């Protein structure tokens, strides 16, 4: 719900879809391949490595290393980055790497970046849900906790949109990377804490 809200807020969805279709298709393909071909691993190693990758990406962002994707490379690179994101999502349940850095490298302005990430996260969420349903991992007992979490998430979305409208772009960028760094550190160190 929050991802759909984020994706639709601001209009211009059709133009974003025309630009993002390669990464979105790649996410679907990568999720399917990951669900079918990746071996099941309960060791948590994939999550640790995802955390390391997130922390590294956030550290590069905090020291102002900016990646840029040339417009002519978006179709091919988008498919590859989307497929990698889908496979990593199946392995970890988190759809941030490499999709978020890729979308950010497309150099959208702040509000369009948030909207583009919402589209990416929506496709990732739906394809992961389909993969989990196919594997029999989605059960009715999850409905209550999910609805409770949704209430908190929607309240957070309202608060986040109010804050985003009042924060300068540099501050938004700083906290975006700080958030990714904290998430990456949490994932990488979770088993050690």
Image (spheres, grey):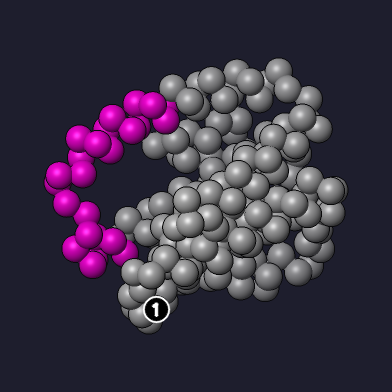
Does the magenta stretch mainly form a helix, a strand or a loop? helix
Residue for point 60% across, 18% down: 162
Where is residue 68 drawn, in percent x and y?
81, 58
Can you identify the residue that label 1 sits on?
Answer: 38
Where is residue 183 drawn, in percent x and y?
56, 47
130 or 188: nearer the viewer: 188
Residue for point 45% across, 39% down: 4
Position of residue 16 relative to residue 88, above or below, is: above
Residue 183 in view (yes/no) = yes
Residue for point 80% across, 58% down: 67
Where is residue 96 drawn, in percent x and y?
56, 54
Which residue extends farthest left? Answer: 140
Position of residue 78 relative to residue 152, above or below, is: below
Question: Which quadrant of the view contains residue 53?
Answer: bottom right
Q: Residues within 10 Å of mark 1 (few under 14, many from 20)?
A: some
Residue for point 50% across, 27% down: 157
Magenta-highlighted residues: 131-154
Q: Is residue 21 left or right of residue 72?
A: left
Q: Is residue 156 one of those drawn in magenta?
A: no
Q: Is residue 146 one of those drawn in magenta?
A: yes
Q: Is residue 186 left or right of residue 104?
A: left
Which residue extends farthest front? Answer: 193
Q: Secondary structure at mark 1?
A: loop
- Quadrant containing the N terminus in the rendered view: top left
171 or 189: nearer the viewer: 189
Question: Which quadrant of the view contains residue 39?
Answer: bottom left
Q: Is residue 98 left or right of residue 168?
A: left
């Amino acid at each position: 719900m929050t991802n759909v809200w984020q994706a639709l807020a601001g209009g211009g969805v059709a133009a974003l879809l025309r630009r993002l279709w390669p990464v979105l298709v790649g996410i679907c393909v990568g999720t399917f391949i990951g669900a079918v071909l990746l071996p099941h691993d309960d060791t948590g190693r994939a999550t640790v490595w995802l955390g390391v990758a997130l922390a590294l990406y956030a550290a590069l962002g905090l020291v102002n290393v900016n990646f840029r994707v040339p417009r002519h490379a978006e179709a091919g690179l988008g498919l590859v980055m989307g497929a990698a994101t889908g496979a990593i999502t199946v392995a970890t349940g988190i759809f941030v790497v490499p999709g978020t850095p890729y979308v950010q490298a497309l150099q959208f302005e702040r509000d369009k970046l948030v909207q583009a990430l919402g589209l990416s996260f929506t496709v990732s969420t739906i394809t992961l849900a389909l993969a989990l349903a196919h594997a029999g991992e989605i059960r009715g007992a999850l409905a209550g906790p999910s609805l409770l979490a949704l209430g908190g998430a929607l309240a957070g979305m309202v608060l986040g949109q109010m804050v985003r409208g009042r924060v300068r772009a540099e501050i938004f960028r700083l906290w975006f990377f700080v958030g990714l760094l904290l998430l990456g550190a949490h994932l990488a160190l979770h088993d050690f804490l």
